[in-house]
Amino acid sequence: MTEWILFVVLSVIAIGSAVMMLVGRNPVHCALWLVLTFFCVAGFFLTLGAPFLAAVQIIVYTGAIMILFLFVVMLVNPEREGEPAVPASHRRAGLTLAAVLLVVMVGAITTRSGLGAIPTEPGGVTLRQVGTALLTEWMLPFELTSVLLLVAMIGAIVLARRRIE
Amino acid sequence: MTTTWRELGYLTPELVVLLGAAAVLLLDLFLPRGRRRVLGGVALVPLGVALGWVLRALWAQSGGPSQLHKVFGALLLRDPYSLGFDVVFLVAAILGVLLSLRYVEREALPAGEYYALTLFAVFGMMMMAMSAELITLFISYEILSLAVYVLAGIARGRAVSAEASLKYFLLGAFASGFLVYGIALVYGATGTTVLYDPLGQSASTISGLILERGLFGNALLLAGLALLVVGIAFKAAIVPFHAWVPDVYEGAPLPVTAFMSAGVKAAAFAAFARLLFGGFRNLGEVWQPVLWVLAVLTMVLGNAAAIRQQNVKRMLAYSSIAHAGYLLVALAAYTARDVAIGSVLYYALTYTAMGVGAFAILLVVGQEGEANQELSDYRGLASRHPWAAAAMGLFMISLAGFPLTAGFLGKFYILNAALRADLDGLAVVLGLASVVSWYYYLRVVWFMYMTEVPKAAVRPISRATSLGVAVAVAALLVIALGVFPSTALAVAQMAGHTLLPLGY
Amino acid sequence: MLKEYFPILLMLVLAIGFGVTMIFLSSLAGRKTATATKTAPYECGSLPVGSARLRFDVKFYVVAILFILFDVEAVLLWPWAVLQAQQLKLTGLVEAAVFVGILLLGYLYALRKGALEWE
């Protein structure tokens, strides 16, 4: 019962703040609404028994990525407070696409076939289990991730630094 | 440690390329600036070593039974299929580096980063071709993508290059989102991310579970598959996910365009075929019509747009979309999969040779830079520089698919697969599209051989050795693949057969 | 299972509640006299100069992105660290060493290229 209440409350806040982010005109405010959405997603992870993912969600998304978002907002348009309105035709196209996606997703989830296939841990997944999985079965993606991070690092520095040494 | 050294040994070419990238990066940090021109040469070493290893491994298996090893559980497959695509990536990269040697110096691009990122991109491609599991596939796809986004924008002085990089990055990030979303839905429907088990040891793979649980009409699974197709179609430059191609190919530095038009596309198709013929082989009736439509759209739109171009670089960009369409025809021929997969591999190699060759000539005529890319710059090239014109002519008629060229055989094998799969309509569209493409490819030849230009307007061309070597290698490959196709084709077919159903 | 998180929830409620109460109380009890000087934005006691919406320097962006990358690295090493502390195994150590080693290359690169210097 508690989980159900939590789910409803978190969903309302998450969807509400996501909508606020979309309709907001001030990019800084939009970013802050997104932070709220991210917090709710972390809450979802907790209720689903994935505390590690909840922590990652807060550390990486609300912590690091939102900082970058705000930096980029400040980097790109410091002067204009409000963005010009999106043309109605784009808005309609976006809404149509979103509606189609919603129908597909709801349809896919409500058929439920196969949904039970995902192996779930009754007591939630502990950090140890995550670590064991990462270091044994998923060792290769784990190491590949560090290559990916290295490439991202080089790329960011090449494209953003001022003069080439 | 479950993974033994022996298993790591199967990854030798990938590890050599990765270590090469690290070596280039380190050398760049500690070499004085004047000595950094050696980095291009350094980058060629791991590529050459890896190519040698791959060719030897393929050679050892041609004729005999093909060897298939699972590496890291079932995440990677070292099979002739991945080896065959490795050849394509490595040839594209070696030609790409040869094209870059003078270009990087001339345009004062950061050499260390340039070659290191090229090697990282190749590493990503090779891992992509080996991936038999969606998360590994995704991370490899991202390694490749990030490296190429940066390479496209590495000429920061030129605004078009920065624009190309940004466009590619934004749309590419969107495509990655589709791919991840697709992976999540497929996992939700099946509970696994492993595509298939070629040795038939485990049934808990996507292809096995589709059969076992009868997930043929499962909405979650189908939605996931659709998103996966979108994510990969973007990288393969398939219409309607091609919007980025002309701007990015035109804006990126020429050697990068050459490398990505061949390598990135081949990597996308390698993953595409593994995904469809491996993991989703039991849903062929579902995805085949989709590919049919995409193939027609891609061939028609790619050719229609290429006709209108006056700029040769842009023309080649649009025509590369058309070639993605030809490759799609082979993928759509899934009922004839015993020949279809091999024809994809053969065509990918052929396109690499003739496509990169054509871009190399652009560099020759552009004097190693981004100049003289208009059709009119090719006026009278034959009388001034017969060798350059002859090579360009060869690449053009091969791209157009004239008989006796590699391009013709490539198309012939794809047509063969399409007809065997009873895709007569698709085969007709392919034939008509090729005829249309003759117009814009032969127009270049016509400008080179049939027009003259006043003496005063004659511009010199580049005579750099590295460019000459690249053109010669590409031309020899085109001729060899066209005149003596049997060895390459046999290997391609053998490689293609690894994807055929043995087990789950 | 969720009971474990009750103290965290309690702390959140207390912290937010305390802040909100204080603001509410001060607005209730405080005297309000608005002058031009008082309503001006507070900038460390000195007079505010220009707009607060300044264009950020691109070097902030480089720092932010490097922060994200090392942040992700730390997050990925976290489960390893827990595991390693409880049952030390050589393979785990080797895997982490490879992971960190690759990123060390990136750190060295950033260092040598001056990406970490503030000019």
Image (tube, coloured by chain):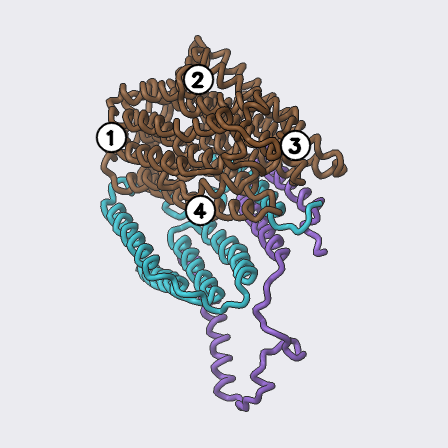
Q: What residue type is labelled 2?
A: Thr
Tag 4: amino acid: Leu
Q: Are marks 2 and 3 on the same chain?
A: yes
Q: Earlier in the sequence, mark 4 or mark 3?
A: 3
In the figure, what tint was chain C given? purple
Please, which residue is most extreme toward the top here?
Answer: B63
The label on residue B102 is: 3
The answer to whether marks 2 and 3 mark residues whose Cβ atoms lie closer than 8 Å is no
Real-space Cα separation, disc 4 to disc 3, in angstroms? 31 Å
Q: Can residue B70 be seen in this view?
A: no
- Tell me the number on the disc at residue B285: 1
The residue tagged with tag 1: helix, strand or loop? helix
- For the residues tagged 4 and 3, is the chain the same? yes
Measured as percent of width and height from the top left, residue B370 is found at: 58, 38
Quarter holding residue B338:
top left
Callouts 4 and 2 close, C-beta under 8 Å = no
Residue at mark 3 shares a chain with residue at mark 1: yes
Residue pictured at 41% horizontal, 53% vertical:
A45
In what element is the residue under mark 4? helix
Ranked by sequence position, the earlier of labels 3 and 1 is 3
Q: Which chain carries label 4?
A: B
